[in-house]
Image (cartoon, rainbow, N blue to C red):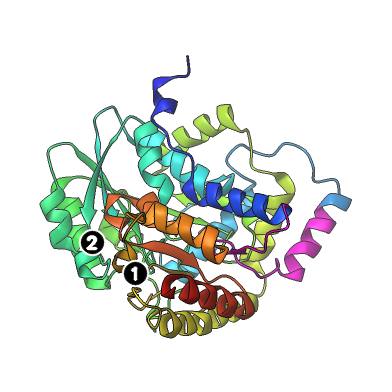
């Protein structure tokens, strides 16, 4: 019989919806996919050229389990340059994507029964990762504050078993950016109540507030309490290359390297070379993507709020829209799952049901606007017609 831990682990809803949409397209059905959070841009040419060079030079063997030294140095330089985080290579681990970095972190940090405060709606994998590590999820409902976590919300959630808090800003699925003053106040709570912070900053470059994303690990007193997680996946349109990284306390990072050594050995050698070029090379492509995403964000905001039953708060970052569609729930459509199924079957548009992001998300759906303007225009028009009939 399958283990208890896997019996309670749910498949990734985002990947499941994408798989169904792909299967429909193979059958010749014209489906527009707004499900997965994947940039529609290509990996920049300078990064691809580095991979060709690495292969030609025979860089195809095992590397150090926690990543090649040059990449770890580059990550340290990046964190100092962009995030004001001063760290050393022994505080850094390179993993097979940001997901593995996060899973390593929870496995190294949590003991059975430890509580993790999780602002909800949240990215689909956080809760399952915590539970696989035998931790307990304690959700905080942010829907009444435009999805913005506050220090007061955190204070009210702290209990005797609180071990960590997850921050994700700019946040998936909502696009919310947590105010700097709130992050600083949360840091004071972490110090006072002795808990760690797992800061997922994968979307840091897609922040449209006019202010740079603020890293909690840049607060000097938080140096030994924060695990900063990032990846090259979204920033450089490198989702399939599977390179993520984490910076945190050295003793924990050492434990994560031991775990990773037994799970996957090292990250892909040539993908590490690609990530090295991504971090050290020109950053023009990142700015170009952010500019285009902001343009699409504005279009989606204006267009979606004209669809009957849809209510969308202006996303401050990432490339997702998370509209409240509960006004569309009637008849056989009772929740976000049945509404998403309706859109797939009636409009031939794939979105993610909000329940995938926690119980608090069930009034919503997530739509990725990392798609062409042509697809966005056509897809939103299909949705408008479907709900208007």
The verdict on residue 315 being magenta is no
Between residue 311 and residue 239, name the one nearer to us: 311
Q: Are the residues flagged by discs 2 and 1 in contact, CB closer than 8 Å?
A: yes
Between residue 17 and residue 266, name the one nearer to us: 17
Mark 1: secondary structure: loop
Q: Which residue is mark 1?
A: 176
The verdict on residue 43 being magenta is yes
**Magenta segment, which residues?**
27-54
Give residue 40's mark: none
Between the residue at mark 2 and the residue at mark 1, the CA separation in whole angstroms equals 10 Å
Between residue 259 and residue 295, name the one nearer to us: 295
The residue located at (40%, 25%) in the rendering is: 5
Q: Residues within 10 Å of mark 2 (few under 14, many from 20)?
A: some
> Where's residue 45, x and y in %?
76, 70
> Where's residue 76, x and y in %?
51, 58
Mark 2: secondary structure: loop
Q: Residues within 10 Å of mark 1 (few under 14, many from 20)?
A: many
> Where's residue 278, x and y in %?
65, 64
Q: Which residue is mark 2?
A: 142
Q: Using the image, determine if residue 272 lies above or below residue 365.
A: above
Residue 40 in which image quadrant? bottom right
Q: Using the image, determine if residue 97 lies above or below residue 376.
A: above
The residue located at (77%, 63%) in the rendering is: 48
Residue 227 visible at all? no
Residue 134 visible at all? yes
> Where's residue 263, x and y in %?
57, 30
Residue 194 in which image quadrant? top left
The residue located at (17%, 62%) in the rendering is: 151
Q: State left or right for residue 227 relative to residue 37.
A: left
The residue located at (45%, 40%) in the rendering is: 103
Residue extending furthest right?
A: 56
């Amino acid at each position: 019989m399958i283990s208890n831990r896997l019996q309670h682990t749910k498949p990734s809803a985002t990947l499941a919806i994408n798989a169904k949409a792909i299967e429909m397209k193979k059958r010749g059905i014209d489906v527009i996919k707004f499900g997965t959070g994947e940039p529609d841009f290509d990996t920049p040419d300078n990064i691809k050229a580095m991979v060709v060079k690495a292969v030609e030079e025979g860089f195809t063997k095992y590397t150090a389990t926690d990543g090649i030294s040059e990449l770890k140095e580059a990550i340290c330089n990046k964190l100092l340059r962009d995030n004001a985080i001063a760290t050393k290579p022994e505080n850094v681990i390179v993993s097979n994507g940001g997901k593995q970095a996060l899973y390593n972190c929870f496995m190294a940090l949590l003991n059975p029964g430890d509580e993790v405060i999780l602002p909800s709606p949240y990215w689909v994998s956080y809760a399952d990762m915590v539970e696989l590590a035998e931790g307990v999820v304690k959700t905080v409902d942010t829907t009444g504050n435009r999805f913005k976590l506050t220090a007061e919300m955190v204070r009210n959630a702290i209990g005797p078993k609180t071990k960590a808090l997850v921050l994700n800003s700019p946040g998936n699925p909502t696009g919310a950016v947590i105010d700097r003053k709130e992050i600083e106040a949360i840091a004071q709570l972490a110090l006072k109540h002795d808990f760690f912070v797992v800061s997922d900053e994968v979307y840091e470059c897609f922040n449209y507030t006019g202010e740079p994303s603020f890293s909690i690990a840049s607060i000097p007193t938080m140096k030994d309490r924060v695990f900063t997680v990032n990846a090259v996946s979204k920033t450089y349109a490198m989702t399939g290359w599977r390179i993520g990284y984490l910076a945190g306390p050295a003793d924990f990072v050492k434990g994560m390297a031991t775990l990773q050594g037994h799970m996957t050995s090292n990250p892909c050698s040539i993908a590490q070379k690609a990530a090295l070029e991504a971090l050290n090379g020109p950053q023009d492509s990142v700015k170009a993507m952010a500019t285009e995403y902001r343009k699409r964000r504005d279009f989606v905001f204006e267009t979606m709020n004209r669809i009957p039953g849809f209510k969308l708060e202006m996303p401050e970052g990432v490339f997702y829209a998370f509209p409240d569609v509960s006004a569309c729930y009637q008849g056989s459509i009772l929740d976000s799952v049945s509404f998403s199924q309706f859109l797939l079957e009636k409009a031939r548009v794939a979105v993610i049901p909000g329940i995938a992001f926690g119980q608090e998300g069930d009034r919503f759906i997530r739509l990725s606007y990392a798609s062409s303007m042509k697809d966005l225009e056509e897809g939103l028009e299909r949705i408008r017609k479907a709900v208007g009939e």
